[in-house]
Amino acid sequence: MLLPPERRRSLLDTRVVAAYLAGTLCGAMLTALVAWVLSGFTEPLTDLARLALLGAGGGLLWAAKHGLLRGVLRLPEARRQIPAEVFGANLVRGAYGFGFELATGVRTYVPSAAPYVLLLTVLLIRPPLGIALLMGAGFGAARAAPLLLRLVTTRTGAAPRGTARLAATPATMIVLLGGLTLV
């Protein structure tokens, strides 16, 4: 756990959260940049074909992660936690590395279809580079939001059971609708 369950926060806690936020932003923006570069391969497709592929792909991704195809169609993800070695001897540097790896999704669980839909959106819609990077930054900030909230919250407490699962479908739909508006 990056932050101890205390009511008062120290300067170290703030530095850890800042490093984690920097890591999630860098990791997500790098992923968006790579997806944007690869999106050049979809340029020959018509707008209608892109729209159809985005809608069908978004539905398929949601079904694979949360719907009828859950457990049948596995999306690419590492099915293990990020190892403790990422943190090493320095908690601040470790928080950056953890945030970076978490935002790229290459070394940990991906609990929602939203990151896959976001990548599909960048690949198929091919927004301008600045917009793609902003999409990545938004995703990185969203990945850091729970820890940021914990830093500023004075009360401790756990979220109700099942909250993450309830939030996964709306997050996926919001990303898909946002992508469709770019067409």
Image: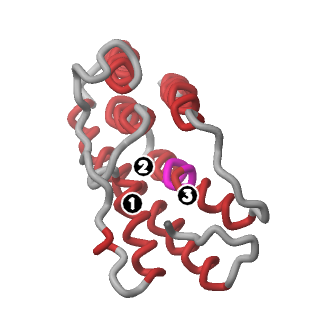
Q: Amino acid at mark 1?
A: Gly
Give the CA distance from mark 1 to mark 3. Answer: 12 Å
Which stretch did the figure color magenta? 137-142
Where residue 158 appears, as percent x and y from the top left, is 64, 50
Q: Amino acid at mark 3?
A: Ala
Mark found first going from the N terminus, 1 or 3: 1
Identified at 27% across, 47% down, the residue is: 37
The residue tagged 3 is: 144
Identified at 37% across, 71% down, the residue is: 97
Where residue 130 appears, as percent x and y from the top left, is 48, 51
Mark found first going from the N terminus, 2 or 3: 2
Mark 2 residue crowding within 10 angstroms, few (<14) / some (14–19) / many (20+): some
Q: Is residue 38 left or right of residue 146?
A: left
Identified at 40% across, 76% down, the residue is: 94
The residue tagged 2 is: 129
Q: In the rendered image of this protein, does residue 80 appear above or below residue 117?
A: below
The residue tagged 1 is: 27
